[in-house]
Image: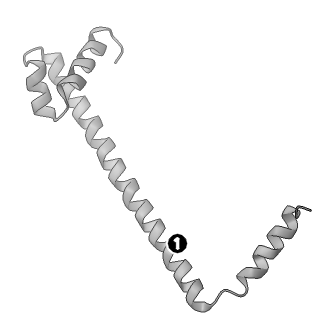
Amino acid sequence: MPESPKIMEFEEEEKMRYVTTAERIGMEKGIKKGRIEGKIEGKIEGKIEGSLKKATKTAKNLLSFNVLTLEQIAQATGLTSEEVRELHQSLKCGNT
């Protein structure tokens, strides 16, 4: 006969009372380490996203001058040639 969720929850709570101090410290350290790693990943992703937005804005400005080639804009911004081509097409179509 399957146990009810309340019984399972109670049993889980009761088991936690018998966790040793060393185990509890280990769990706390693991949780703390996980939070730190998550914050670091978030910061890195934010920086990458910010850099991409800045490069895209710069490419749009350079495209508006209509002086440089798409390849030159790609080299200047760090975007790929394909990304610059797509951005150029979207500007020509009035999408951005």
Is residue 48 at least partly visible in the picture? yes
The residue where tag 1 is placed is 31
What residue is at 36 percent from the left and 55 percent from the top?
43
Residue 53 lies, in percent from the top left, at 29, 35
Q: Position of residue 2 (x, y in %)?
A: 88, 61
- The residue lying furthest to the right in this view is 1
Indicate the position of residue 20 as horizontal and vertical percent values: 63, 90
Instruction: Using the rendered view, name the quadrant where residue 19 is placed.
Output: bottom right
Q: Residue at x 17, y 25 (%)?
A: 81
Vertical placement of residue 86 versus 18, above or below: above
Q: Viewer-proximal residue, 5 or 82?
A: 5
Q: Could you classify mark 1 by the number of other residues whose Cα lies within 10 Å: few (under 14), some (14-19), or many (20 or more)?
A: few
Q: Residue at x 49, y 79 (%)?
A: 29
Give the structural element (helix, strand or loop) at label 1.
Answer: helix
Is residue 60 among the parts visible in the rendering? no
Colour basis: one colour
Total marks shown come to 1
Query: In the image, is residue 19 above or below residue 70?
Result: below
- Left or right, 15 with reference to 56: right
